[in-house]
Image (cartoon, rainbow, N blue to C red):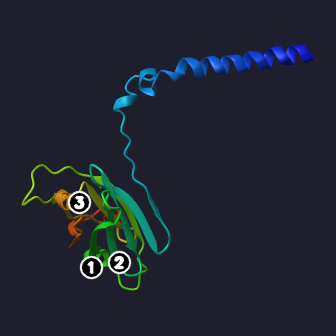
Amino acid sequence: MLLLGLVVGLSIGGAVAAGVFIGRGRSQASIIPGLADLHLKASASHGSDTFAIATGPIDDDVEGLFTLDFLTGDLNCYVINPRNAAIGGWFNANVANVLKVEKGKKPNYLMATGTIQVAGTAGGQRPASSLCYVVDANTGDAVAFTFPWVKAATAIGAPQSTPMRPLGPWKTRSRDLNQ
C-alpha cells in the first residue's frame, strides 16, 4: 500500500512539474488563441433603500463612480485622474427635478450605466463614454444623463466640473395597463 501511494504521488508530482516546465516559456496568449486581443471592460452597480452606486467608462483609460442619493435626488459622478490619482472630475444633476417624484411617495430609483460613442467633438469636448440611466420605479419614468469630457484636461491634471445633461425623460410604463 505504501509503495502504491508513493508511485501515485510521484506520478502526480511529475505531471505537475512537466506542465510547469512546458508552460514556462509560453504566454497565455499562445495557449489560448485570441486571448492577447481580449480587453475586459466591466461596470458594476449596487443599491439600497436610499442610495445607489454604479461604475461606467468615461474615456479609454478612466471610469467614473456614479452615486444617487434617493433622499435628495442628487446624482454625482466622480472621476479619478489616472495621471495623479486625484479627483479629476465631478459632475452632478438632480434626478428628482427631472423625474418629478409623486407627492407623498418615497422615491424608489433604479440606476445602471451604459456606453455611448459619439462621433465628433465641439471645442475639444465630447460626451463621456457612459450614460447613467435612472428609472423611477414608482412611475416607470426614465432619464439618461451625460456630461462633457475633455480628455486634454486629464493630461495636464486640470479638474473638470459641469452639470450633467439629461437625455429624456421618457415613459417606460403606461399608466393604463389596458393600452
Residue 145 as seen in the image, left or right of residue 14? left
Label located before the other in sequence (3 or 1)? 1
Would you say 66 lies left or right of 8 here?
left
Nearer to us of marks 3 and 1 is: 3
The residue lying toward the viewer, choosing from 111 and 1, is 1
Q: Residue furthest bottom?
A: 104
Residue 163: quarter of image: bottom left
Q: Taking 6 as reference, is 107 left or right?
A: left
State whether residue 51 is above or below residue 154. Answer: below
Tell me, for residue 131, which label it has, or none: none
Residue 40 spot, x, y in % from top left: 38, 41
Disc 3 crowd rating (10 Å Cα; few below 14, some 14-19, many 20+) is some
- Does the rendering let one see residue 163? no
Q: How many marks?
A: 3
Cα distance in 3D space between marks 3 and 1: 30 Å
Residue 3: name its quadrant.
top right
Residue situated in front as seen by the camera: 131 or 98: 131
Q: Secondary structure at mark 2?
A: loop
**Position of residue 148 measured from the top left corner of the image (x, y, whole percent):** 18, 63
Give percent across and percent down for residue 33: 40, 22
Q: Splitting the image into 4 quarters, where does residue 87 fall?
A: bottom left
* Mark found first going from the N terminus, 1 or 2: 2
Amino acid carrying label 1: it is Asn
Residue for badge 1: 97
Point 55% across, 17% down: residue: 22
Instruction: Please report contact status of discs 1 and 2: CB closer than 8 Å, yes or no.
Output: yes
| In contact (CB < 8 Å): disc 3 and disc 2 | no
Q: Which residue is mark 3?
A: 154
The local secondary structure at tag 3 comes to helix
Which residue is the site of mark 2?
Answer: 73
Q: CA distance from mark 1 to mark 2?
A: 8 Å
Q: Report the amino acid beneath label 2.
A: Gly
